[in-house]
Every structure is written in structure tokens, then in C-alpha cells.
Image (cartoon, grey):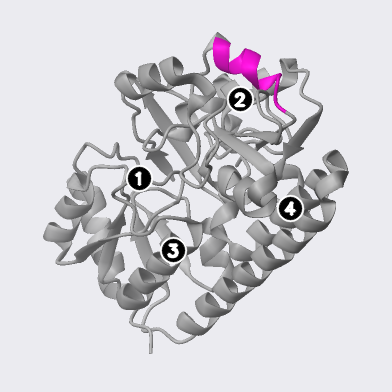
Amino acid sequence: MNVRRRRISGIAVTAATAIGLGTLSACSSDSSAAGNTDKFDVVASFYPMQYLAEQIGGDHVNVTSLTEPGQEPHDLELSAKQTAQMGEADAVLYLKSLQPAVDEAIAQSDVKTKIDAAGLTKLEDHGDVEHDHDHGGEEHSEGEHAEEDAHAEEEHAEEGEHALDPHVWLDPVKYAEIAEGVAKSFEKADPDHADDYRKNADALAKKLGGLDTAYKDGLKSTDTKVFFTNHAAFGYLAERYGLTQEAINGLDPESEPSPARIKELQTEAKADGVTTVFYETLVSDKTAKTLAKDAGLKTDVLDPLEGITDKSKGDDYLAVMESNLKALETALGAK
């Protein structure tokens, strides 16, 4: 598939640059930037990493996020101030190759503890999970901006090769594996609070285990196993729970599907009993609604959890994942 990624607003980039690392998570009570507190200062690259740092670190950490709420994380650009402040942190937690600008800054940073979530679980090739970004009207693959490596992001790969899918946080089991690795890194980097980090990590593992069980039970028996999305972010989730993800092919989120693609999806919807076209909170629902209208389908939100905003159906990872489960149960005809 060749799904075009959504465009980030230039205003959002400017705002993020101006704010720098001063943006804190909603759960943090400390208003200081990384490196300026007496806590264990952690810089997280985007929301799924921020959530782990907050849950595991608890009261002992001061977490700042490089990605603003509502900002498309793949296209993040860092200011010189952000890069400099990163070096003052005690640890940085990121997902290698998801955000090339972050990778470059971390490679040049003197931060002692660098935690790459992609190295804490196994990334997989989900086939045609290639996307084109639209940067101000020009299409560029992230592969043009980041060095290819074992943890390459889902961007368009050379000569038909498939890159590895980075959306591991949408699989509670893989996310739990990452959480365990993060906890061990925190324990080693800040041994004075190791016991609390372990206790918090165990509590998080229970929550993620419960979420996994809820998905298994909720999606075990359904009328159909196929769901439509306009962003191929749910490959790990689909694989974990025996589903098939079908992303709208070759479409910018702001554009309308071609007649040929509509016909193709109409045929598939009828053959597989598809009822719903899913869209995302950070993306216009125009494409989904156009397809749904022409194919006689419903629309609903399936959130890839790349960020939490006031439009999110939940105020944290667990709440949004539970909302996603309900949406899938309804769309797939869970019994």
C-alpha cells in the first residue's frame, strides 16, 4: 500500500519550536525543562514513550515531550534549543527511525542514558505498509532523510523492499515488552529509586495484560475480521488478534478516493462484511466519509495514539485503547 501520511501544520511546527522542551505531560506537576530539576529528567520523543516514562517513573521523574499534543510526530523538527536541552537530560526515550530529526539529535547528544524502544522488542515487516508524507506539496519518503537500519520506519523502501513497521505500541503485548526494558534502564540509571521503578513497572504490566485479555475476549468471535483505515498503523494489533487491516490506498487524507479505489473497496466490503471506515482524530474525516457514503458504510474513529488531544476518546493510553476496542467490536460485529 502506498498511503500518504497526513500533513503537519507549519503553525504547529513553529509553536513546538518556540516552546522547546518546556512542554510537559498533563500528568507532570513539575514545570521545569529537562536537566533543571532534582528529579530524574527524561525526554520522551512522542506520546507513547511519554506515557511509559510517566507510568514507570512516577513521582521520581520529570518528563518532557519533544512532540506537541496534536502534532504529527513523524514530521517533527527540533530547534537548536531543544537539541541542546536534550543533552542536559538524564535519559532520553525514543523509537528509532520513527522521527529522523530525533534520531539525529540523539546521535549527537551527550545524554548518558539513551533508550531505544525499537531495540526492546521485535519489529516486524507487515508487507505493504509504506506511506508517502506530503511536505508542503512535495512527497518525500522518510527513507530519504534517515539512515536505513534494522529498525527502519514504515516509509517507502527502496526497490519494493518493505521496511519494518514501527507501530508497536498498538500491540499491548509488545508495548509491555518495551515497558519492561524501559524499567530496567531506569533502575540502572537511577538506582536510588529502583524499587519504585520496579513496582510501577509491575503495575503497568498488569494493566497492559488486562488490556490484552480484553482485546482477546472482545474480538474472539466476530462477524468479520476485516477493517478499513486510512492509515496503516494497526498491523501489530491486527496480527495479535487475528484481524486484517486494509488501509485506503494511495490517498492523501485531504483528498477524495479515486472511483477505481472506491469500487475496489466496495467489492471488498461486500465480500468481507465490512461495515465501517475508520479515520483518526488528527486527520480530516473527509476521505473516510466520502468512501463510506459511496460504499454504504459507517464511519468511526480508530486512534493510532500518536498523541493525545482534546479530541481523543480518552485522556491516556489505556482509555484510548479501550475506546478503540469498543469501536472494533461494534464495527466487526463482536458476539
Residue 189 vertical position relative to residue 101 in the rendered view, above or below: below
Percent position of residue 50, x then y: 57, 43
Is label 1 in a helix, a strand or a loop? Answer: loop
Residue 268 vertical position relative to residue 102 in the rendered view, above or below: below
Label 1 sits on residue:
309
The local crowd at label 1, few if under 14, some if 14 to 19, many if 20 or more residues have their Cα within 10 Å, is some
Is label 4 in a helix, a strand or a loop? Answer: loop
Is label 2 in a helix, a strand or a loop? Answer: helix
Labelled pair 4, 2 in contact (Cβ < 8 Å): no
Q: Is residue 83 one of those drawn in magenta?
A: yes
Q: Residue at x 37, y 73 (%)?
A: 326
Q: Please state which of residues 80 and 264 is positioned toward the viewer in this rendering.
A: 80
Label 3 sits on residue:
319
**Foreground: disc 4 or disc 2:** 2
Viewport quadrant of the C terminus = bottom left
**287 left or right, relative to 189:** left
Label 4 sits on residue:
121
Percent position of residue 14, x then y: 37, 16
Tell me, yes or no, if residue 166 can be seen here: no
Q: Is residue 310 one of those drawn in magenta?
A: no
Q: Which region of the structure is painted magenta?
A: 81-89
**131 left or right, relative to 86:** left
Is label 3 in a helix, a strand or a loop? Answer: helix
